[in-house]
Amino acid sequence: MTKITYIAPDGERIETEAQDGSTVMETAIMNGIPGIVAECGGACTCATCHVYVDDAWTETVGGPSMMEEDMLDFAFDVRPQSRLSCQIKVSDKLDGLVVHVPSRQG
């Protein structure tokens, strides 16, 4: 299992185990991570699963696709490390991933 840590806006760290092949958003929903709304269920048609990939992980995770970039236009407080968690596939290379949950979703 791949470990993912979600950091809430108040600094609370929530450590989870993710199934390879799932997404960071699906893992958040399965573990009740506050702040990950995922209104579209992972179809990349909203911005309610917005996260900030921790600086140490941005190169490994990679950047958003063109479609994801378009949806990030609807997110609040977009930063260079912003991603939609529904578009980040879990794999062994992401073991230890850290993402930060924004204070509000789009």
Image (cartoon, grey):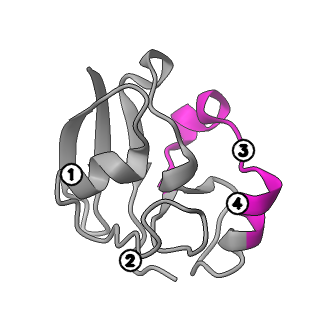
Give neighbour class at mark 3: few <14, some 14-19, many 20+ (Cα, 10 Å): some
- Residue 63 belongs to magenta span: yes
Pick the quarter of the image with the N terminus: top left
Q: Badge 3 is on which residue?
A: 63
Question: The magenta stretch spans which residues?
Answer: 52-70
What's the distance in space between the residues labelled 4 and 2, CA to CA? 20 Å
Give neighbour class at mark 2: few <14, some 14-19, many 20+ (Cα, 10 Å): few
Q: Amino acid at mark 3?
A: Gly
Q: Position of residue 83 (x, y in %)?
A: 59, 55
Mark 4 or 2, nearer chain start: 4
Mark 1 or 3, nearer chain start: 1
Q: Badge 1 is on which residue?
A: 30
Name the main secondary structure of what is drawn in magenta.
Answer: helix
**Image position of 78 (left or right of 29):** right
What's the distance in space between the residues labelled 2 and 1, CA to CA? 20 Å
Identify the mark at residue 68; answer none if there is no mark: 4
What's the distance in space between the residues labelled 2 and 3, CA to CA? 22 Å
